[in-house]
Image (cartoon, rainbow, N blue to C red):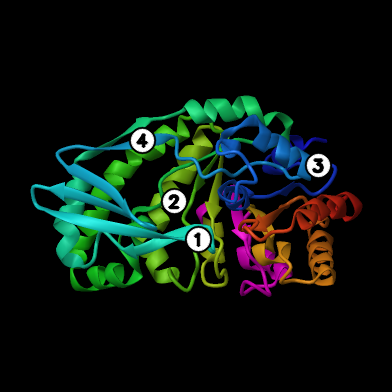
Amino acid sequence: MTPRERILAILKGERPDQVPWCGDLDYWANSLIIRGLKPKEFIKSAEYIQWHRELGVGFYLQGYFPYKQIYEKCEVREWNEGHKRFKEIITPVGSVRECWEYIPTSFSEGPVEHFMKSETDIPVMKFIYENCKFEADYDFARQRLKQVGDQGVVLCYLPKSPFMHLLALEAGVMSLTMAALTTPVEFQDLLDTMKKAFDQAAQIAVDSPAEVLMIPENLSSEMVGPDLFELYMYDYQKEWTGKIRDAGKYSFIHIDGTLAGLLQQEAAVGFSVLEALTPYPVGDLKFEDLADFAGDSKSILWGGIPGVYFTACVSDEEFERHVKNLLAIMVKEPRYVLGAADQVPPDGLESRVRRVAELVNAFGKY
Protein backbone atom coordinates (compact mmCIF):
# COMPACT_ATOMS: atom_id res chain seq x y z
CA MET A 1 0.00 0.00 0.00
CA THR A 2 1.08 3.61 -0.52
CA PRO A 3 1.36 6.12 2.34
CA ARG A 4 -1.87 7.71 1.13
CA GLU A 5 -3.71 4.40 1.09
CA ARG A 6 -2.52 3.62 4.62
CA ILE A 7 -3.64 6.99 5.99
CA LEU A 8 -7.05 6.75 4.34
CA ALA A 9 -7.52 3.18 5.58
CA ILE A 10 -6.92 4.26 9.18
CA LEU A 11 -9.25 7.26 8.80
CA LYS A 12 -11.99 4.95 7.49
CA GLY A 13 -11.54 2.54 10.38
CA GLU A 14 -9.94 -0.12 8.18
CA ARG A 15 -6.67 -2.00 8.61
CA PRO A 16 -3.80 -1.14 6.23
CA ASP A 17 -0.87 -3.46 5.55
CA GLN A 18 1.27 -1.73 8.18
CA VAL A 19 1.28 1.21 10.57
CA PRO A 20 1.26 4.52 8.66
CA TRP A 21 4.28 6.77 9.28
CA CYS A 22 3.86 10.51 8.72
CA GLY A 23 6.08 13.38 9.77
CA ASP A 24 5.92 17.16 9.87
CA LEU A 25 9.15 18.23 8.16
CA ASP A 26 8.30 21.94 7.80
CA TYR A 27 10.46 23.27 10.67
CA TRP A 28 13.45 21.19 9.54
CA ALA A 29 12.95 22.21 5.90
CA ASN A 30 12.76 25.92 6.79
CA SER A 31 16.06 25.67 8.63
CA LEU A 32 17.65 24.02 5.61
CA ILE A 33 16.39 26.86 3.39
CA ILE A 34 17.78 29.50 5.76
CA ARG A 35 21.14 27.69 5.83
CA GLY A 36 21.20 27.69 2.03
CA LEU A 37 20.89 23.90 1.78
CA LYS A 38 17.51 23.99 0.02
CA PRO A 39 16.11 26.53 -2.49
CA LYS A 40 13.88 29.37 -1.29
CA GLU A 41 10.64 27.95 -2.76
CA PHE A 42 11.44 24.36 -1.72
CA ILE A 43 8.51 23.84 0.66
CA LYS A 44 5.91 24.88 -1.91
CA SER A 45 7.43 22.83 -4.71
CA ALA A 46 6.84 19.32 -5.98
CA GLU A 47 10.42 18.58 -4.88
CA TYR A 48 9.27 18.90 -1.27
CA ILE A 49 6.87 16.00 -1.75
CA GLN A 50 9.59 14.05 -3.56
CA TRP A 51 11.83 14.66 -0.53
CA HIS A 52 9.19 13.02 1.69
CA ARG A 53 9.05 10.12 -0.75
CA GLU A 54 12.83 9.64 -0.69
CA LEU A 55 12.88 9.76 3.11
CA GLY A 56 9.97 7.33 3.36
CA VAL A 57 7.74 9.84 5.20
CA GLY A 58 4.01 10.21 4.62
CA PHE A 59 2.92 13.80 3.95
CA TYR A 60 0.04 15.61 5.67
CA LEU A 61 0.97 18.80 7.53
CA GLN A 62 1.99 22.14 6.08
CA GLY A 63 0.64 24.97 8.22
CA TYR A 64 -1.71 26.34 5.57
CA PHE A 65 -4.79 28.50 6.25
CA PRO A 66 -6.89 28.57 3.03
CA TYR A 67 -8.17 32.11 3.52
CA LYS A 68 -7.01 35.71 3.84
CA GLN A 69 -7.98 38.10 6.64
CA ILE A 70 -8.94 41.59 5.49
CA TYR A 71 -9.09 44.50 7.95
CA GLU A 72 -11.72 47.17 7.32
CA LYS A 73 -11.97 50.63 8.93
CA CYS A 74 -8.46 50.05 10.31
CA GLU A 75 -4.98 51.17 9.38
CA VAL A 76 -2.40 48.39 9.48
CA ARG A 77 1.33 49.18 9.73
CA GLU A 78 4.05 46.53 9.54
CA TRP A 79 7.83 46.96 9.78
CA ASN A 80 11.02 45.19 10.83
CA GLU A 81 13.80 46.26 13.21
CA GLY A 82 16.64 43.77 13.09
CA HIS A 83 15.27 40.40 14.17
CA LYS A 84 12.04 41.98 15.42
CA ARG A 85 8.84 42.04 13.33
CA PHE A 86 6.23 44.66 14.33
CA LYS A 87 2.56 45.04 13.44
CA GLU A 88 0.29 47.85 14.57
CA ILE A 89 -3.45 48.11 13.99
CA ILE A 90 -4.90 51.60 14.37
CA THR A 91 -8.67 51.95 14.84
CA PRO A 92 -11.04 54.83 15.68
CA VAL A 93 -11.18 53.55 19.28
CA GLY A 94 -7.44 53.09 19.81
CA SER A 95 -4.52 51.04 18.60
CA VAL A 96 -2.72 47.81 19.48
CA ARG A 97 0.79 46.65 18.59
CA GLU A 98 2.57 43.31 18.58
CA CYS A 99 6.19 42.28 18.12
CA TRP A 100 7.61 38.88 17.21
CA GLU A 101 11.36 38.29 17.56
CA TYR A 102 13.29 35.84 15.40
CA ILE A 103 15.96 33.77 17.15
CA PRO A 104 18.62 32.67 14.62
CA THR A 105 19.96 29.82 16.74
CA SER A 106 16.54 28.14 16.88
CA PHE A 107 15.34 29.14 13.38
CA SER A 108 12.08 30.29 14.98
CA GLU A 109 10.28 33.35 16.29
CA GLY A 110 8.07 34.08 19.27
CA PRO A 111 5.97 36.96 20.60
CA VAL A 112 7.67 39.47 22.86
CA GLU A 113 4.77 41.95 22.76
CA HIS A 114 1.11 41.04 22.32
CA PHE A 115 -1.74 43.06 20.82
CA MET A 116 -3.88 42.68 23.92
CA LYS A 117 -1.83 43.72 26.94
CA SER A 118 -4.70 44.06 29.41
CA GLU A 119 -8.49 44.23 29.64
CA THR A 120 -8.28 47.91 28.60
CA ASP A 121 -7.50 46.72 25.05
CA ILE A 122 -10.73 44.72 24.73
CA PRO A 123 -12.66 47.56 22.95
CA VAL A 124 -9.92 47.84 20.32
CA MET A 125 -9.73 44.08 19.83
CA LYS A 126 -13.51 43.91 19.52
CA PHE A 127 -13.55 46.69 16.92
CA ILE A 128 -10.91 44.87 14.87
CA TYR A 129 -12.92 41.65 14.77
CA GLU A 130 -16.19 43.46 14.11
CA ASN A 131 -14.55 45.02 11.07
CA CYS A 132 -12.65 42.19 9.46
CA LYS A 133 -13.65 39.65 6.87
CA PHE A 134 -12.15 36.53 5.34
CA GLU A 135 -11.80 35.56 1.70
CA ALA A 136 -11.00 32.15 0.23
CA ASP A 137 -7.41 31.52 -0.85
CA TYR A 138 -7.44 28.03 -2.36
CA ASP A 139 -4.64 28.21 -4.92
CA PHE A 140 -2.03 26.46 -2.78
CA ALA A 141 -4.47 23.71 -1.75
CA ARG A 142 -5.20 23.01 -5.41
CA GLN A 143 -1.46 22.99 -6.14
CA ARG A 144 -0.81 20.55 -3.29
CA LEU A 145 -3.54 18.20 -4.49
CA LYS A 146 -1.67 17.87 -7.78
CA GLN A 147 1.71 17.45 -6.07
CA VAL A 148 0.97 15.03 -3.24
CA GLY A 149 -0.18 12.04 -5.25
CA ASP A 150 0.25 8.76 -3.38
CA GLN A 151 2.53 10.24 -0.69
CA GLY A 152 -0.21 11.48 1.62
CA VAL A 153 -3.21 13.76 2.07
CA VAL A 154 -3.86 17.51 1.84
CA LEU A 155 -4.64 19.19 5.17
CA CYS A 156 -5.79 22.77 5.76
CA TYR A 157 -6.37 24.73 8.96
CA LEU A 158 -9.46 26.25 10.46
CA PRO A 159 -8.85 29.11 12.92
CA LYS A 160 -8.04 28.22 16.49
CA SER A 161 -10.89 28.65 18.94
CA PRO A 162 -11.11 32.36 19.87
CA PHE A 163 -9.87 31.68 23.42
CA MET A 164 -6.84 29.72 22.25
CA HIS A 165 -6.12 32.26 19.49
CA LEU A 166 -5.82 34.97 22.13
CA LEU A 167 -3.80 32.78 24.48
CA ALA A 168 -1.29 31.62 21.90
CA LEU A 169 -1.06 34.61 19.58
CA GLU A 170 -2.64 37.91 20.55
CA ALA A 171 -2.80 38.22 24.35
CA GLY A 172 -0.73 35.60 26.15
CA VAL A 173 -1.75 33.63 29.22
CA MET A 174 -1.31 36.42 31.83
CA SER A 175 -3.32 39.13 30.07
CA LEU A 176 -5.94 36.60 28.98
CA THR A 177 -6.43 35.24 32.49
CA MET A 178 -6.64 38.68 34.07
CA ALA A 179 -9.18 39.85 31.48
CA ALA A 180 -11.33 36.75 31.99
CA LEU A 181 -11.27 37.20 35.78
CA THR A 182 -11.63 40.98 36.12
CA THR A 183 -13.98 41.80 33.21
CA PRO A 184 -15.80 38.54 32.44
CA VAL A 185 -18.74 40.14 30.61
CA GLU A 186 -16.56 42.24 28.31
CA PHE A 187 -14.18 39.31 27.80
CA GLN A 188 -17.00 36.98 26.76
CA ASP A 189 -18.32 39.68 24.45
CA LEU A 190 -14.90 39.78 22.74
CA LEU A 191 -14.88 35.99 22.34
CA ASP A 192 -18.40 36.08 20.85
CA THR A 193 -17.33 38.78 18.41
CA MET A 194 -14.26 36.81 17.41
CA LYS A 195 -16.32 33.66 16.88
CA LYS A 196 -18.63 35.42 14.43
CA ALA A 197 -15.58 36.36 12.40
CA PHE A 198 -13.85 32.99 12.78
CA ASP A 199 -17.00 31.15 11.69
CA GLN A 200 -16.56 32.78 8.26
CA ALA A 201 -12.98 31.55 8.02
CA ALA A 202 -13.84 28.09 9.35
CA GLN A 203 -16.54 27.60 6.71
CA ILE A 204 -14.13 28.70 3.99
CA ALA A 205 -11.68 26.07 5.25
CA VAL A 206 -14.32 23.33 5.32
CA ASP A 207 -15.33 24.22 1.76
CA SER A 208 -11.71 24.18 0.56
CA PRO A 209 -10.12 21.41 -1.54
CA ALA A 210 -8.53 20.01 1.63
CA GLU A 211 -9.22 16.35 2.34
CA VAL A 212 -8.62 16.64 6.08
CA LEU A 213 -9.00 19.68 8.34
CA MET A 214 -7.30 20.72 11.55
CA ILE A 215 -8.15 23.05 14.40
CA PRO A 216 -4.54 23.93 15.28
CA GLU A 217 -5.05 24.62 18.98
CA ASN A 218 -1.47 23.67 19.95
CA LEU A 219 -2.82 22.63 23.31
CA SER A 220 -0.88 21.85 26.44
CA SER A 221 -2.85 21.09 29.57
CA GLU A 222 -0.68 23.11 31.96
CA MET A 223 -1.86 26.19 30.03
CA VAL A 224 -5.53 25.23 29.56
CA GLY A 225 -7.06 22.89 32.11
CA PRO A 226 -10.43 21.11 31.98
CA ASP A 227 -12.39 24.05 33.43
CA LEU A 228 -11.20 26.64 30.91
CA PHE A 229 -11.56 24.08 28.12
CA GLU A 230 -15.20 23.36 28.98
CA LEU A 231 -16.00 27.02 29.48
CA TYR A 232 -14.34 28.55 26.44
CA MET A 233 -13.30 25.94 23.86
CA TYR A 234 -15.51 22.84 23.84
CA ASP A 235 -18.51 24.36 22.06
CA TYR A 236 -16.43 25.80 19.20
CA GLN A 237 -14.62 22.51 18.64
CA LYS A 238 -17.82 20.45 18.89
CA GLU A 239 -19.61 22.64 16.37
CA TRP A 240 -16.86 22.56 13.77
CA THR A 241 -15.95 18.89 14.10
CA GLY A 242 -19.61 18.23 13.35
CA LYS A 243 -19.57 20.47 10.30
CA ILE A 244 -16.34 18.86 9.07
CA ARG A 245 -17.95 15.44 9.44
CA ASP A 246 -21.10 16.61 7.63
CA ALA A 247 -18.86 17.74 4.75
CA GLY A 248 -17.53 14.17 4.44
CA LYS A 249 -14.09 15.12 5.71
CA TYR A 250 -11.93 14.24 8.72
CA SER A 251 -11.11 16.49 11.68
CA PHE A 252 -7.77 16.83 13.49
CA ILE A 253 -6.85 18.54 16.75
CA HIS A 254 -3.21 19.53 17.37
CA ILE A 255 -2.55 18.73 21.04
CA ASP A 256 1.21 18.58 21.35
CA GLY A 257 1.95 19.48 24.96
CA THR A 258 1.18 17.77 28.27
CA LEU A 259 -1.75 15.41 27.82
CA ALA A 260 -3.07 14.10 31.13
CA GLY A 261 -5.20 17.16 31.88
CA LEU A 262 -7.01 17.38 28.54
CA LEU A 263 -6.71 14.19 26.46
CA GLN A 264 -9.94 12.73 27.79
CA GLN A 265 -11.81 15.99 27.21
CA GLU A 266 -10.51 16.37 23.67
CA ALA A 267 -11.30 12.75 22.87
CA ALA A 268 -14.91 13.41 23.93
CA VAL A 269 -15.31 16.23 21.38
CA GLY A 270 -15.46 13.80 18.46
CA PHE A 271 -12.31 14.57 16.49
CA SER A 272 -11.31 11.99 13.90
CA VAL A 273 -7.67 12.39 14.96
CA LEU A 274 -5.84 13.52 18.10
CA GLU A 275 -2.55 14.59 16.53
CA ALA A 276 1.06 15.34 17.57
CA LEU A 277 0.71 13.34 20.80
CA THR A 278 4.04 13.61 22.62
CA PRO A 279 4.61 10.78 25.11
CA TYR A 280 6.96 10.19 28.01
CA PRO A 281 9.87 10.80 28.53
CA VAL A 282 9.29 14.21 26.89
CA GLY A 283 5.56 14.35 27.61
CA ASP A 284 3.67 13.42 30.76
CA LEU A 285 1.98 10.16 29.68
CA LYS A 286 3.43 6.88 28.54
CA PHE A 287 2.27 5.97 25.05
CA GLU A 288 0.79 2.69 26.25
CA ASP A 289 -1.55 4.67 28.54
CA LEU A 290 -2.96 7.02 25.89
CA ALA A 291 -5.79 4.74 24.78
CA ASP A 292 -7.07 4.40 28.36
CA PHE A 293 -6.99 8.17 28.84
CA ALA A 294 -8.92 8.62 25.58
CA GLY A 295 -11.65 6.37 26.98
CA ASP A 296 -14.39 5.13 24.69
CA SER A 297 -13.47 7.60 21.97
CA LYS A 298 -12.78 6.20 18.51
CA SER A 299 -10.35 9.01 17.76
CA ILE A 300 -7.13 7.99 16.02
CA LEU A 301 -4.00 8.53 18.15
CA TRP A 302 -1.33 10.13 15.96
CA GLY A 303 2.25 10.90 17.01
CA GLY A 304 4.67 9.19 19.35
CA ILE A 305 8.24 10.23 18.40
CA PRO A 306 9.31 13.41 20.27
CA GLY A 307 11.28 15.82 18.12
CA VAL A 308 14.40 15.47 20.23
CA TYR A 309 14.56 11.77 19.32
CA PHE A 310 15.54 12.77 15.80
CA THR A 311 18.65 14.54 17.14
CA ALA A 312 22.03 13.49 18.49
CA CYS A 313 20.83 14.42 21.99
CA VAL A 314 19.29 10.92 22.10
CA SER A 315 21.42 7.85 21.49
CA ASP A 316 20.84 5.50 18.57
CA GLU A 317 20.01 2.74 21.05
CA GLU A 318 17.34 4.79 22.83
CA PHE A 319 15.88 5.95 19.52
CA GLU A 320 15.57 2.36 18.29
CA ARG A 321 14.10 1.17 21.58
CA HIS A 322 11.51 3.94 21.63
CA VAL A 323 10.29 3.47 18.05
CA LYS A 324 10.13 -0.32 18.39
CA ASN A 325 8.11 0.06 21.59
CA LEU A 326 5.67 2.39 19.83
CA LEU A 327 5.24 -0.04 16.96
CA ALA A 328 4.65 -2.96 19.32
CA ILE A 329 1.68 -1.01 20.73
CA MET A 330 0.42 0.27 17.40
CA VAL A 331 0.23 -3.10 15.64
CA LYS A 332 -2.31 -4.35 18.18
CA GLU A 333 -5.14 -2.42 16.53
CA PRO A 334 -5.48 -0.07 13.52
CA ARG A 335 -6.04 3.01 15.62
CA TYR A 336 -2.61 4.61 15.46
CA VAL A 337 -0.47 6.64 13.10
CA LEU A 338 3.22 6.93 13.89
CA GLY A 339 4.25 10.56 13.71
CA ALA A 340 6.80 13.14 14.77
CA ALA A 341 5.60 14.83 17.94
CA ASP A 342 5.37 17.42 16.91
CA GLN A 343 8.11 18.22 14.35
CA VAL A 344 11.53 17.11 13.18
CA PRO A 345 13.72 19.97 14.52
CA PRO A 346 16.46 21.90 12.69
CA ASP A 347 19.16 19.70 14.22
CA GLY A 348 17.33 16.55 13.17
CA LEU A 349 19.45 13.82 11.60
CA GLU A 350 18.46 12.62 8.15
CA SER A 351 19.62 9.13 9.12
CA ARG A 352 17.08 9.05 11.96
CA VAL A 353 14.22 10.11 9.69
CA ARG A 354 15.14 7.43 7.16
CA ARG A 355 15.51 4.85 9.93
CA VAL A 356 11.89 5.26 11.03
CA ALA A 357 10.66 3.96 7.67
CA GLU A 358 13.03 0.98 7.94
CA LEU A 359 11.75 0.16 11.42
CA VAL A 360 8.12 0.45 10.32
CA ASN A 361 8.77 -1.89 7.41
CA ALA A 362 10.39 -4.39 9.78
CA PHE A 363 8.19 -4.12 12.89
CA GLY A 364 5.02 -2.28 11.82
CA LYS A 365 2.99 -5.12 10.27
CA TYR A 366 -0.32 -5.99 11.90
Query: How far separated are the C-alphas under marks 4 and 3?
Result: 37 Å
Circle 1 sits in a helix, a strand or a loop, which is it? loop
Does residue 232 lie above or below 334 as drawn? below
Label 1 crowding class (10 Å Cα cut-off): few <14, some 14-19, many 20+? few
Residue furthest to the left in view is 92
Q: Which residue is mark 1?
A: 104
Give me the residue at 53% from left, 38% from top.
Answer: 245
For the question of whether residue 169 can be seen, the reply is: yes
Query: How far separated are the C-alphas under marks 4 and 2?
Result: 21 Å
Label 4 crowding class (10 Å Cα cut-off): few <14, some 14-19, many 20+? some
Mark 4 / mark 2, whichever is N-terminal: 4
- Assess whether mark 2 and mark 3 are in contact (beta carbons under 8 angstroms): no
Mark 4 / mark 3, whichever is N-terminal: 3
Q: Nearer the viewer, mark 2 or mark 1?
A: 1
- Assess whether mark 2 and mark 4 are in contact (beta carbons under 8 angstroms): no
Q: Quadrant of residue 178?
A: bottom left
Query: How far separated are the C-alphas under marks 1 and 3?
Result: 41 Å
Q: Nearer the viewer, mark 4 or mark 2?
A: 4
Q: Is residue 113 left or right of residue 215?
A: left
Q: Give the magenta range.
A: 269-297
Give me the residue at 62% from left, 63% from top.
Answer: 294
Q: Which residue is mark 2?
A: 237
Asked if the magenta segment contains residue 287, the reply would be: yes
Label 3 crowding class (10 Å Cα cut-off): few <14, some 14-19, many 20+? some
Mark 1 / mark 4, whichever is N-terminal: 4
Q: Which mark is residue 16?
A: 3
Q: Which mark is residue 68?
A: 4
Query: How far separated are the C-alphas under marks 2 and 1?
Result: 35 Å
